[in-house]
Amino acid sequence: MSDIVVVGAGQAGASLVAELRKQGFDGGLTLIGAEPVPPYQRPPLSKGYLMGDMALERLFLRPESYYADQGITLRMGAAVDAIDRDARTVCIAGEATGYDQLALTTGSTPRSLPASIGGDLDGVYVVRKLEDVDAMAAAFTKGARVLIVGGGYIGLEAAAVAAKLGVEVTLVEMADRILQRVAAPETSNYFRALHSEHGVNIREGIGLNRLIGEGQVSAAELSDGSTMELDFVVVGVGIAPNTALADAAGLEIDNGIAVDALGRTSDPHIWAAGDCCSFPYREGRLRLESVPHAIEQAECVARNLLGAQETYVPKPWFWSDQYDVKLQIAGLNTGYDRIVTRPGPGRTASFWYYRGETLLAVDAMNDPRGYMIGKRLIEAGKSPDPALVGDPDADLKALLKT
């Protein structure tokens, strides 16, 4: 019998300990989390929970009794200060907890605005944790004015919730277009039009010079020299993997905690999964930021902790909910050189990413059928004729048989 300690009680950590017990591990199992609540879902925080449509209890991934029933020691509100690799212990407020195997599922942290431009003013929020959303919820009142900094999915989701609650929304994106880092111009155009229809003022190619206020933010100066009065700010400018603990312990860091194809770090007794780590992928390394990846990689690591020797092969998929539109993404679009548009009725549409004749990814808006077929094609390594994909009268399902 051995002791496994998991540091980080988000989606990956919760999935890892559950899979260990599912696979029959009966040794000591401890899940340590810095937040004072049991593991919970993060995606609904900035949507259903912020809207008031989802109660706190519905956020929890499992009832707290589950962990006791499974013999999992749940240590919440406990920040790990250090890892002693020689002694095989983790330190929490001066107390050492031993491990035979350690898994790091420490997640990521949203990038914040520097204090030098007013990022430390009251009324400036990021979206990541339960306490973040609890802190900002009262600001989302009808008639309030918000500046959203960043036109990625987090910023756009926050804009959608704010607009639905009657908040006056201005969103600035320093790049030439929203979603520039993650999506094709066609997808950017789709969501720009959607937000404009809901009254969101999207300003692309515009950055933030500084926030203004005496203690509480009250205005912003933008890079075009204009100023705007506001009541609060939501910052969505990306996330950074939480690697400080691993770095201090001397583990290899490469765009996250570097792990091998099994999920093992440069220390054979320490593993990692989820947002915090990068893993071998094709000719390089990849770090993914998504719930499905966190679950699938964590479950793979759990099996490998028990000796499975299973190579982790990602099957990337993502989603975003904005107004009445569900965006579903299959695959990774890196390196695309062509977009095929498949139109549909109303707001239905999908954009298919090709590199040459190879299908890489699909963005599907209110098109679950297109998404599912695209996902299956990508996972099977099949690349349908782009002309057929772009023909709205062609039967997509038939493409699976080719």
Image (spheres, rainbow, N blue to C red):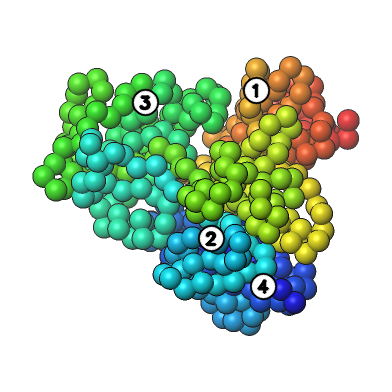
Whether pointer 4 and pointer 3 mark residues with C-beta atoms closer than 8 Å, the reply is: no
| Mark nearer the viewer, 4 or 1 | 4
Calculate the distance from the C-alpha at mark 4 to the C-alpha at mark 1: 43 Å
* Circle number at residue 174: 3
Residue 144 makes an appearance in the image: no
* Along the viewing direction, whichever of 72 and 225 lies nearer the viewer: 72
Residue at the disc numbered 1: 335
Calculate the distance from the C-alpha at mark 3 to the C-alpha at mark 2. 39 Å
> Disc 1 or 2, which lies upstream in sequence?
2
Label 3, secondary structure: give it: loop
- For label 4, the residue is 3
To which quarter of the image does residue 308 belong? bottom right
Residue that label 2 marks? 83
Q: Residues within 10 Å of mark 1 (few under 14, many from 20)?
A: few
Of the residues tagged 2 and 4, which is closer to the observer?
2
Q: CA distance from mark 1 to mark 3?
A: 23 Å
